Image (spheres, rainbow, N blue to C red):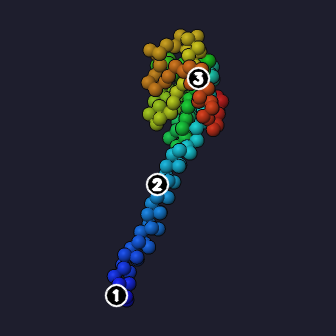
């Protein structure tokens, strides 16, 4: 009887050590998965461009920094801010000492942000799908509604 117990002892010790280690790795995997799922959805709503160039620059820079720091950013451009997504105009003046709009926009999109452009406003500003920068999308009312409903926070610029 004693001999049988000693034969099983190594297996029992290995099992006793395996369960906590397996549980630890499972918890780490779950933590990583839940943190990705729990990324904050932030909607940045922009309405102006040239008349408020400093504010537009601040909004774009904030959107880019939030996206690069793990938030899920949607940039919603309407009224005259649709011109930020216009490839013909976005290369225009930037505030002194600031990154060019095109560089900030590219970084924002390259890091996974979604850019929605009000279709109606784009029509009024004569910005067509052909003029949009890569990563920008002419948005339907349903696209905007979905973005607003998914947002944890909405910032207005």
Q: Nearer the viewer, residue 94 or 79?
A: 79
Q: Which of the marked residues, 1 or 2, is nearer the chain's N terminus?
A: 1
Q: Provide residue 133's location: percent of width, then percent of height.
A: 46, 22
Q: Nearer the viewer, residue 116 or 84?
A: 116
Question: Left of 85 or right of it: where is 49?
Answer: right
Q: Are marks 3 and 1 in contact (CB under 8 Å)?
A: no
Classify 129 as above or below 7.
above
- Label 3 crowd (10 A; few <14 / some 14-19 / many >=20): few
Residue sitting at x 44%, y 73%: 16
Element at label 1: helix
Give me the disc on residue 3. Answer: 1
User: Quadrant of residue 95 in the image?
Assistant: top right
Residue at the far bottom in the pictured view:
2
Q: Which of the marked residues, 3 or 1, is nearer the chain's N terminus?
A: 1
Give me the disc on residue 110. Answer: none
Q: Which residue is mark 3?
A: 142
Whether residue 91 is visible to the viewer of this picture, yes or no, is no
Give me the disc on residue 29. Answer: 2
User: Quadrant of residue 144 in the image?
Assistant: top right
Q: Provide residue 154's location: percent of width, then percent of height.
A: 64, 33
Element at label 2: helix
């Amino acid at each position: 009887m004693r001999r049988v117990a000693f034969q099983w002892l190594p297996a029992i010790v290995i099992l006793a050590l395996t369960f906590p280690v397996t549980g630890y790795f499972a918890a780490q995997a779950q933590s990583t998965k839940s943190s990705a799922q729990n990324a904050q959805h932030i909607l940045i709503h922009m309405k102006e461009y040239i008349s408020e160039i400093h504010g537009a620059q601040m909004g774009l820079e904030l959107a880019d920094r939030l996206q690069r720091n793990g938030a899920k950013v949607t940039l919603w451009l309407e009224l005259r801010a649709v011109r930020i997504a216009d490839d013909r105009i976005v290369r225009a003046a930037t505030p002194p000492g600031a990154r060019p709009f095109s560089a900030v926009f590219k970084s924002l999109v390259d890091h996974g942000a979604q850019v929605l452009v009000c279709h109606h406003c784009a029509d009024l500003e004569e910005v067509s799908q052909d003029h949009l920068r890569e990563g920008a999308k002419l948005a339907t009312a349903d696209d905007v509604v979905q973005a607003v409903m998914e947002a944890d926070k909405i910032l207005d610029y």
